[in-house]
Image (cartoon, rainbow, N blue to C red):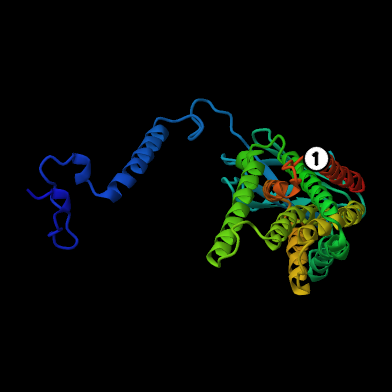
Amino acid sequence: MTNPTNAPDTNPPGTTAQPHHGESPARQVPRWLLGVGPLVLIALLIGLFTLLNAPGITGGGGRVPEEAVAIENVRFEPGRIILAVRNEGVDPVTVAQVNVSDYFAQFTQTADEMAPLEPNTITVDYDWVQGDPYEITLLTSAGGKATAEVAAAPSPERGAQFFGLMVLLGVYVGVIPIGLGMLWLPFVRRASREWVRGLLAFTVGLLVYLTVDAALEGLELVAGSAAFGGSLVVLLGAVIAYLALEGIEGLAVRRRRDRGDAGDSSPQMFALLIAIGIGLHNLGEGLAIGSAYAVGSLALGASLVIGFAIHNTTEGLAIVTPLARTRPRLGRLAVLGLIAGAPAILGALVGASVNQPTLAAFLLGVGAGAVAQVAVKLLPLLRSDTGRVLTPLTVSGIIGGVLFMFLTGLLIVA
């Protein structure tokens, strides 16, 4: 007797095979329907939940509206202040009052009610004084508040000259210090094996500090805000960056195996991962600088530039340390320096264009996750001849890296 499962398929193309005697009903259903079916049921359940005046979705159950308004930009013109705002919450928002340094000012707006994620432009009638600081507060109809502080009016005009300055500051903060730090490569190449292990441990310490610092800064930006998930956006950014770098490394290792090389990551790959992680972290530093200059806080911006420039010099050392036993070409080193430093330029441009705390927190989370992934990957390189990762030498190097970044971080005025 012929086995039915091995019988040839005699059905015409595009038709469904007739079920054999005794076949389960589930096998009679098209496979695509089995995949879509649960999604349809979930959609029906959500629809039913909404029709029943579900609390949290339709406003049922006497739920108090959750209002979250962000002031993304402040611009000063003669006799008025123009605000670019956005509703970041899930409920419609109406701006009822505008307070400028304890004075309730007259204003007009392009939208009387902002739907979720909808932008709005508010024009405030106010005779501001050049050089004076201002605190601008928006009061919503439900009692919510959104505040923006301007260190000195007017904020700089956002023209070609201003954005050119942001590019220059990004180069000064990111590209140049990292390039200077990479000049330690000749010293690293002449170092003994123990010295290289100590420098790698120092690099791990730098990365540990950067991970914690970026995560804390991101959490501080969204503290007390539930918009877009609140503090969860920092975690989301960190997870995405960590997994993305794991994927990049896995792809590189597979290509090496296909070429017949050893399956482990090469020194060049370690250097590239460090450059990517540091670059994503420097993106957050650029955001801080651009935001400071955008609101006219020039003193704060200048202190950030000086502090970050000193802070970032050792990041160049972190990139070249895995290359201690190689002879990298000058072009490769230049590319690594740009990968690590150029994101500071992009960050400064974005920070100068829009003040969006949630976006900044997400990008800081991305930097934290990327740097953490690199630190984890470097740990096996610290292993001594006896197989121990944490030895007196490596522990001292890690602590030294953390302390160095902490001390140079004191030059940065938050």
Query: Which x, y percent locates residue 29?
Result: 22, 46
Q: Which residue is drawn at 31% across and 43% down?
A: 37
User: Where is 135 relative to 144, above or below?
Assistant: below
Q: In this view, does 183 lie to the left or right of 139?
A: right
User: Where is 253 relative to 135, above or below?
Assistant: below
Give the quadrant of residue 168. Answer: bottom right
Q: Is residue 261 left or right of residue 182?
A: left
Q: Residues within 10 Å of mark 1 (few under 14, many from 20)?
A: some
Q: How many marks?
A: 1
Nearest to the observer: residue 128 or residue 355: 355
User: Where is 173 relative to 133, above or below?
Assistant: below
Q: Quadrant of the C terminus?
A: top right
Question: Which residue in the rendered view is the most extreme toward the top?
Answer: 61
Give the quadrant of residue 335. Answer: bottom right
Question: Which residue in the rendered view is the most extreme toward the front?
Answer: 386
Q: Which residue is drawn at 61% across and 42% down?
A: 228
Query: Which x, y percent locates residue 90?
Result: 56, 40
Is residue 94 visible to us here? Answer: no
Residue denoted by label 1: 391
Query: Which x, y percent locates residue 358?
Result: 68, 46
**SS for dot 1:** loop
Q: Which residue is drawn at 79% across and 70% down?
A: 160
User: Identity of the amino acid at label 1?
Assistant: Thr
Is residue 228 visible to us here? Answer: yes
